[in-house]
């Protein structure tokens, strides 16, 4: 083989190899493109499935509210009261059927001071109501009617109360009542928050209150705040501003109502003190560390009350840096091995207790930590301030 043939052979081999390389690139590119197209199709299929899944999970809340309203509206009533011997209605509110013994729950402030109470059902039937009892500290009242009307088109029944300790913010809710005398009105919203402490006109507070953005107006008081299950989450009580309303939790309403039905009244556990958070001025004046500064200071001890009997000591008010300041009172740091960092925590924990229960208080006094056992009593009705 001469050099020319050798070079020609190498040239042919190079050309063939180059052709195979080019064909390989083309085949690889086609395969990759097909693979990517397959992946894209799979992604699109997956996305379509996701869309379908989300579509299937869509809830028609409008239909839910409509069905719920149909189910429970017959059990919600209007409360009309007359005072001072007048023949005309002097006040209105709402309520709902509580049990098969014809008891109806409403707010205490709705029927407070009334001479005559009437219950108006959504079919227009009106019944005179007996006030079984009421509790101004929780704003719950129980009425009783002699008869609950019913027919083929009107079927009221006792509404079931939920376990309000399981309620979470974000849950959808519906309120039914008679705002401004407009009977059978429905509004809806969500649970905005739980565990609120709501001050009352009596100087005490209602703990574990439910906050909602469902519109509440005068006349809604005493009506039910319902979850989409149809259970009562709370008893509507107050509106504090736009999109801020409150309801007494169902657990509290049930405890109070049951006690009123059984005994005519409800006994609130009472410790017999007034308290305030430790202020910055007080902390500096008393040279308190950060932990003690987070407690609550006793500023008043009711003579003869549980705290007085246990030996708790109140503070005094002086001027510090030009401001009125409570100093030198016992500072509550804990209760039954629970840290207490504000008034609301103490009030909420006391709400779980009953008269006769004994609690242990962790107290800071004169630079030392001490423990006091306090036996709780029933809150006197004559007490307007703790």
Image (tube, rainbow, N blue to C red):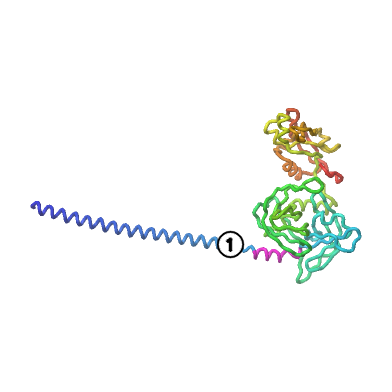
Stretch of the chain drawn in magenta: 62-75
Image coords of residue 56 (percent x, y):
56, 63
- Using residue 185 as the reference point, say whether residue 119 is left or right of it: right
Q: Is residue 87 above or below residue 210?
A: below
Camera-side residue of 305 and 279 = 279
**Magenta span includes 65:** yes
**Magenta span includes 262:** no
Q: Which residue is mark 1?
A: 58
Q: Main secondary structure of the magenta part?
A: helix
Image coords of residue 181 (percent x, y):
79, 63
Q: Is residue 111 above or below residue 299?
A: below
Instruction: Locate the C terminus and report the quarter of the image it occupies.
Output: top right
List the single residue furthest toward the front.
322
Q: Is residue 385 above or below residue 320?
A: below
Image coords of residue 174 (percent x, y):
70, 59
- At 32% across and 58% down in the image, what residue appears? 29
- At 15% across and 53% down in the image, what residue appears? 10
């Amino acid at each position: 083989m001469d050099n020319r043939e050798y070079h020609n052979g190498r040239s042919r081999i190079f050309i063939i190899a180059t052709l195979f390389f080019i064909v390989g690139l083309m085949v690889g590119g086609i395969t990759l493109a097909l693979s990517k197209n397959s992946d894209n199709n799979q992604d699109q299929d997956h996305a379509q499935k996701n869309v379908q899944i989300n579509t299937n999970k869509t809830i028609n809340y409008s239909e839910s509210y409509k069905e719920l309203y149909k189910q429970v509206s017959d059990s919600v009533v209007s409360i009309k009261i007359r005072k001072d011997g007048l023949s005309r209605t002097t006040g209105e509110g709402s309520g709902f059927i509580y049990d098969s013994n014809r008891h109806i729950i409403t707010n205490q402030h709705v029927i407070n001071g009334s001479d005559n109470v009437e219950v108006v059902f959504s079919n227009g039937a009106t019944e005179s109501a007996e006030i079984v009892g009421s509790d101004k500290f929780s704003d719950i009242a129980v009425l009783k009617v002699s008869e609950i009307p019913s027919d083929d088109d009107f079927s009221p029944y006792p509404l079931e109360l939920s376990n309000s300790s399981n309620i979470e913010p974000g849950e959808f809710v519906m309120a039914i009542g008679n705002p401004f005398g407009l009977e059978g009105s429905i509004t809806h919203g969500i649970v905005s928050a739980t565990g609120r402490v709501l001050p009352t006109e009596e100087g005490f507070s209602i703990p574990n209150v439910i906050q909602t953005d469902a519109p509440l107006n005068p006349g809604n008081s005493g009506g039910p705040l319902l979850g989409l299950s149809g259970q009562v989450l709370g008893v509507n009580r107050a509106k504090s501003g736009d999109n801020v309303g409150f309801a007494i939790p169902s657990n509290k309403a049930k405890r109070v109502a049951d006690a009123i039905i059984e005994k005519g009244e409800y006994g609130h556990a009472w410790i017999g003190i007034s308290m305030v958070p430790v202020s910055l001025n007080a902390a500096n004046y008393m040279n308190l560390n950060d932990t003690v500064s987070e407690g609550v200071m006793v500023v008043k001890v009711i003579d003869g009350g549980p705290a007085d009997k246990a030996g708790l000591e109140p503070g005094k008010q002086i001027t510090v840096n030009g401001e009125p300041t409570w100093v030198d009172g016992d500072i509550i740091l804990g209760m039954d091995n629970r840290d207490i960092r504000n008034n609301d925590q103490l009030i909420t924990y006391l709400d779980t207790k009953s008269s006769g229960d004994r609690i242990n208080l962790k107290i800071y006094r004169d630079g030392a930590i001490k423990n006091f056992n306090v036996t709780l009593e029933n809150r006197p009705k004559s007490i307007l301030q703790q």
